[in-house]
Amino acid sequence: MYAIVEIHDVSPFYKQEVYQAVEFLQRLKIDKFSLLVILNYMEEYPLYKHKDFVGFLKALGQEIVLHGYSHKAKVKLYQILYACEEKYKIKSLRTRPYISFTAGSDDHGGMDVGRTWIEAQALSKEEFLQALREGRTSVDTEKLGYERLLNMISRVGYDFLLNKGKIPSALKPFTDFIFMHSNNPITELFLRTFLGTNAERHSFLKEASDKVPKLALERLLKEPYTSTLGELILALILHSAPTFLAYGQKAEEKRQKRLPKASASYQREKRGLHT
């Protein structure tokens, strides 16, 4: 079996995660991988302001791949592709319009194992790469599910707030453990006792979203104050999050299915402008 190893979303914003990923690959004795770099993540983390990080990337001696400028989408993907083809004569090696995403991990939070992959019939690395170029591949994945979707989106949101210094110091030891930034056994014991759970580590957030509303309601009944009412409202929002996330996921899947039709419409429109 052969694999192409990539570290996605390489930017100063994810500096610690990049260091950990590189260290992990080195422990596995994987000495060849690609760094998918974002030049100015969210237009707030330009590489030129982080020379130490850039120096670290260069010193690795690995392939560096452009992974977008800011990771902020302002136009449709198919518009970008056709504009590149028309203006710069850049054409993709192959086109399979019924596939929107074809590779990589379906986890961007670091709390679950990514479970999306490309398969190809090949007996060597060269045959595998040739199969990729010719489109003789298939994509497979495990169903994402609302628990992993909740973990992924919540972890990304938490990391953003953490980098902005918006996490209250009183909560940080507990939230850091839930979002897998720490492994403090005392914190784990407290949370397991408080939540009454023996769940796996990656299920802690779901357990909290299920049980915190009940705990907040009990607290409100004992101490009927504005602050405890606010805690209950926040707990209900957390509990409802998976439902909204699942709805958003379904809406995105439907949008992606419409993408080939939109692409065809754009092509017809472009041809009409040239006639």
Image (cartoon, rainbow, N blue to C red):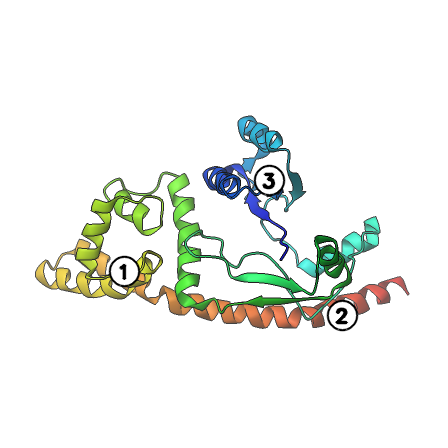
- Residue 16 in the image: state x and y as whole percent: 45, 38
- Earlier sequence position, callout 3 versus callout 1: 3
Q: What crowding class fits label 2: few (fewer than 14 Cα within 10 Å), some (14-19), or many (20 or more)? A: few
Label 1 sits on residue: 208
Which residue is the extreme one toward the left? 222
Which residue corresponds to mark 2? 264
Which of discs 2 and 1 lies nearer the camera? The answer is 1
Q: Nearer the viewer, residue 38 or 181?
A: 181
- Residue at coordinates 71% horizontally, 56% vertically from top-left? 124
Question: Does dot 2 land on a helix, a strand or a loop?
Answer: helix
Q: Residue at x 37, y 64 (%)?
A: 241
Type of amino acid at the residue the image marks with label 2: Ala
Rounded to the nearest angstrom, the CA distance separating label 3 from label 1 is 40 Å
Foreground residue among 207 and 183: 183
Mark 1 is on which residue type? Ala
Q: Position of residue 57 (x, y in %)?
A: 59, 33
**Is tag 2's residue or tag 1's residue first in the polypeptide sequence?**
1
Q: Quadrant of residue 33?
A: top right
Left or right of 127 on screen, residue 142? left
| Mark 3, residue position | 31
